[in-house]
Amino acid sequence: MKCVMIIDGSLPVGIIANTTAALGISLASEARELIGKKVVDRDGRIHEGITNIPIPILTLSREEIKKEYDILLENNDPDIRVIGFSEVAQKSLNYDDYEIKLSSTNKNLINYLGLCLYGPKKKINKLTGNLKMLR
């Protein structure tokens, strides 16, 4: 399995960090197998499990992210988990506010700050193999 995040690289670094954190939390809630077990160091301290696979952060423009998100949702591949983080989510005061705003927003008006894709390595590579790393 493979996970990648695709982020609008023109965003300020704080919004990029927030977007990747939000996407990671959402994915971890759906794919528990991504989190390794707790580990004990030599001094007996317990360290919580962290991701057990690398997660490359790739970049596309905002327009390209929206286009890819729409295509992925239309294709509805059951092997690929697709999570989007939008401006609607980023600007919402809380989850109730997000639900209200999103439910009244047409898909054409939703701008995505980033996407998280998780699925079979070959499929994810085919979708993202030509994208640049975020630097």
Image: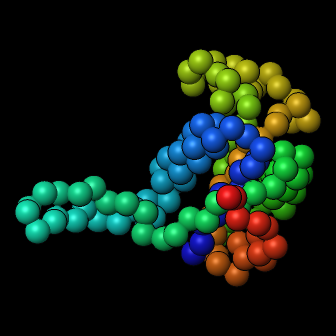
Going 64% across and 22% down the picture, which residue do you hit?
Answer: 92
Q: Is residue 123 visible?
A: no
Q: Is residue 35 left or right of residue 5?
A: left
Give coordinates of residue 9: x percent, y percent: 75, 49
Give coordinates of residue 39: x percent, y percent: 22, 65
| Quadrant of the image containing the C terminus | bottom right
Depicted 10 relative to depicted 87: above or below:
below
Depicted 75 relative to depicted 99: above or below:
below
| Quadrant of the image containing the N terminus | bottom right
Going 60% across and 37% down the picture, which residue do you hit?
Answer: 14
Q: Is residue 8 visible?
A: yes
Q: Is residue 12 left or right of residue 37?
A: right
Judged from this view, the residue extending furthest toward the front is 135
Judged from this view, the residue extending furthest toward the bottom is 122
Depicted 53 relative to depicted 68: above or below:
below
Residue nearer the viewer, 74 or 91: 91
Depicted 36 relative to depicted 85: above or below:
below
Q: Is residue 126 left or right of residue 64?
A: left
Residue nearer the viewer, 108 or 15: 15
Residue 81: quarter of image: bottom right
Residue 73: quarter of image: bottom right
Give coordinates of residue 70: x percent, y percent: 86, 50
Going 73% across and 21% down the picture, which residue do you hit?
Answer: 101
Give coordinates of residue 75: x percent, y percent: 84, 61
